[in-house]
Image (cartoon, rainbow, N blue to C red):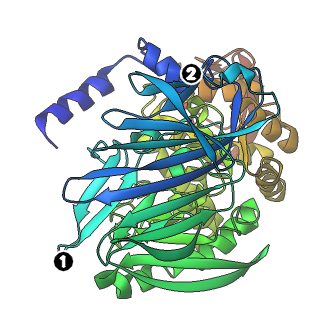
Amino acid sequence: MNKIVQILLLMWYLLPANTTFAYTHADTLRGSNGRGREWWDVQKYVLHVAFDFPNRSIKGSSFINFNVINTPSDSMQIDLQQPMQIDSVLFVNGFATEPMNFAKEGNVFWVFSARNPLHNWAIGGNYSILIFYDGKPRAAINPPWDGGFSWDKDSMGNPWTSVSCQGLGASVWWPCKDAQWDEPDNGMDVHLLLKGDQQAISNGRLVDVTDQNDLKDYHWHVENPINNYDVTFYIGDYAHWHDTLMGEKGKLDLDFWVLKYNEQRARKQFEVVKSMIHCYEYWMGPYPFYEDGYKLVEAPYLGMEHQSAIAYGNKYKMGYLGSDRSMSGYGLDFDYIIIHESGHEWFGNSITARDIADNWVHEGITTYCESLFAECLLGKEKAMKYCRGERINILNNKAIIGDYGVNDEGGNDMYDKGAAIMYMIRVMTNDDERFRLMLRGLSGNFYHQVVTTGEIEDYISKHTGLDLKAFFDQYLRTTNIPKLDYYIKDGKLNYRFNDVVPGFSLPLTVTAGETTEAIRVSGNWASIKWKGGFNVKFSNDFLIKVKNEE
């Protein structure tokens, strides 16, 4: 880690909790459903990309089919990040095309037409545009967290190239409506054109490989809606094998793509996939993308949840690059990247947060999925210890939920604090089958949909039978960890929570010696008769701080 990165990280950790930042006009354009976006709904993308490896550049086209759902404004917002450039835009009407005008504003291109004004387009109509573009896309700085293109080579010197762009945005490499809430209803087609003997893998299923002059065109088809940031490619000297499993919806195709010299150890490491999918289907319902299959693809970075084409870069180690994030002793019993990234197929890819401010729905629930797999593998007690152990990673320097409409993802605690939230809800539900059916209900009711955190909170509350409003407000919207104050006096145990939102309470067990009592603690002082002595311990299932006031 260089000095500049170290200083920046130190500055981040020393920021006061809930530090706010000024947002720019560009943030609003990217994060909001503004005048250039609100009137059209993407139906399908068709993407062609040709790769120039020596110059680290690409050129291609993006075909966008869309429905007009509101009165159009004077222009449509197309996102494409600098230094990429749009060369031309065509209005497509059957086999006829018509040039359209466009104006650049930072990472946004405003597309309009004088001959066929957008405001003449009918509400309910279906239209298409075709965008030609080129340029040198941003190179990844620290993928997948600080993403872009990874122009790498494998250990044999062969080109090995991929992209990671969650947070950064798909517009870093192709022109699109770079909005998490607008997935193409009818899927997409991806054409990857390249020279040489490398294979090109993308999402969905391989339709065919054809010769286009001196290029090979790898055509992949995605049947289902897909997040823009999930659209990806992997180009390398790959070995491939195919398998199937019988899942809840029938036969699921499994495909594995790894660098040729890693095939033998990959076959061993990837054996877990079948038991993992069966486990996840038991807890969360059918794998959401049977039509597109499941792929695990070796990538030149740690991992990403690319829909139906999971990126794998954990170096064939157990745990997280060979370490146990939970410090529980159980994190080395499985490959973290396979288990975590695959869990996103349910939460993140099938169920997608409308605004990235609510991305805890992706990361928090998926981090808890690790515990579900650990439970299938090791049993409930060890899985619960694993999940509690991950709390050591919670920083409490920023609320989990970010600011809406400005492309603010919220705090990194969305992972481990989000998992702790799901863990505590399960404990409060006190009925594992009811909790499991709630998870399956989420997957079924919000299948292939974009959601708000409010919808997820309401569903969980309703189907667990718990009033969780104050609970969610406390853990999602503040950085305050409830502080349990208590003291023993005159044969009574007195207790309350400090630093909590109005209406917050938790059911706790308190023990001392042979004495165990169930109590509910709120922000108001309460007491019970107590004969257990002063060596008091409270249940460790909840994310709280305990302070003896004596």
- Depth check, front residue: 467 or 197: 197
Position above or below: 516 against 72: below
Secondary structure beneath label 2 = loop
Q: Is residue 202 visible?
A: yes
Q: Residue at x 51, y 53 (%)?
A: 47
Q: Residues within 10 Å of mark 2 (few under 14, many from 20)?
A: many
How far is mark 1 from mark 2, CA to CA?
50 Å
The disc, 1 or 2, on the residue closer to the chain's N-terminal end is: 1
Q: Which numbered circle lies on residue 478?
A: 2
- Depth check, front residue: 59 or 448: 59
Q: Is residue 512 visible?
A: no
Q: Residue at x 67, y 70 (%)?
A: 279
Q: Residue at x 65, y 67 (%)?
A: 292
Secondary structure beneath label 1 = loop
Q: Which numbered circle lies on residue 9?
A: none
Q: Which residue is mark 1?
A: 156
Q: Residues within 10 Å of mark 1 (few under 14, many from 20)?
A: few
- Depth check, front residue: 368 or 35: 35
Position above or below: 504 against 136: above
x and y percent of residue 75 in the render? 59, 21
Q: Mark 1 and 2 residues: CB-CB less than 8 Å, in contact?
A: no
x and y percent of residue 227 in the render? 59, 47
Quadrant assignment, res 106: top left
Position above or below: 534 against 273: above
Image quadrant occupied by the N terminus: top left
Nearer the observer: mark 1 or 2; the answer is 1
